[in-house]
Image: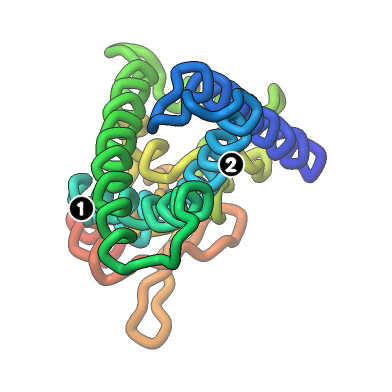
Amino acid sequence: MKGLCSLRIANEILKFCAIVLGLGLIFAWLGVYNTGRLPFYKSFVFWSTTMVVGLGTSLVISPYIWGPRFADMAAIFKIGIAAALISLPVTLVLMIFFTNAPWQPIYFLMQYAYVLVISLIVTSAAYVLDMLKDKDTVVSDGADPIAGFLERLPVKFRTAELYAISSEDHYLRVHTSLGEELILMRLADAVRELTQVDGLQVHRSWWVAKIGVTDEKKSDGRSFLILPTGTEVPVSRSYRAKAKDVGLIR
């Protein structure tokens, strides 16, 4: 399992580097932001640095903004928050490269406003592309959504029963009748893909299939669902009513 995780992380790093270098070359060649007056290598260094900062910030904050903690927040607010946070370090890069005089607050705000507009456009476009990608991955009517989901796991899990899914940072832990496995995916995307499955999200970090619940346990006024493996799944207050409606808890 650790080997697979290390391979996925290495692939993500390579993908990140490829995007940074590719965008750095494109923006330097186009001379965006009046960088065409600079020697090409300086322009390339500037844009590569900017891309590292922008994409790096996005990778750090996205799991939290788009993760289960803010699952109920409207997408437009998530886009705004993400763009605002990404714009701060990117603006600092612009100031470092292009400002020789002492920094003035008004000049920083002007640059930040410019960067924010660009960040809003890019973040919105990324969100739309992500939604279109999610639609493409939704299984067609009549197909088995669980089988499609389990295709992401090693071959030995393809015939397993899906019990539950839990969120762990950038990964999901998939609980099955044949054991557990980590995959690189967001919980929100997994829940969307498993809409047709008889199951429910019961916590900001947990989704369970009804077939995977063998019992209910109560402790200090809290409800826990017991999986066949003995794992206890917490049911949060915000999902309690839905869990009760579908018969997962009493």
Question: Is disc 2 surrounded by few (<14), some (14 to 19) or many (20+) residues within 10 Å?
Answer: some
> What amino acid is at disc 2?
Thr
Q: Is residue 152 visible?
A: no
Residue receiving disc 1: 77
**Residue 173 higher or lower than 139, as above or below:** below
Question: Residue visible at 43% across and 45% down?
Answer: 187
Residue 152 on image: x %, y %:
58, 26
Q: What residue lies at 58% left-to-right and 47% top-to-bottom?
A: 173
Q: Which is closer to the viewer, label 2 or label 1?
A: 2
Q: Residue at x 45, y 18 (%)?
A: 30
Q: Position of residue 31 (x, y in %)?
A: 45, 23
91 on left or right of 119: right
In the depicted view, which residue is nearer to us: 72 or 45?
A: 45
The residue that disc 2 covers is 49
Q: Picture coordinates of residue 60 (x, y %)?
A: 52, 53
* Quadrant in the rendering for residue 236: bottom left
Relative to 14, is 78 above or below?
below
Pick out the residue farthest to the front: 101
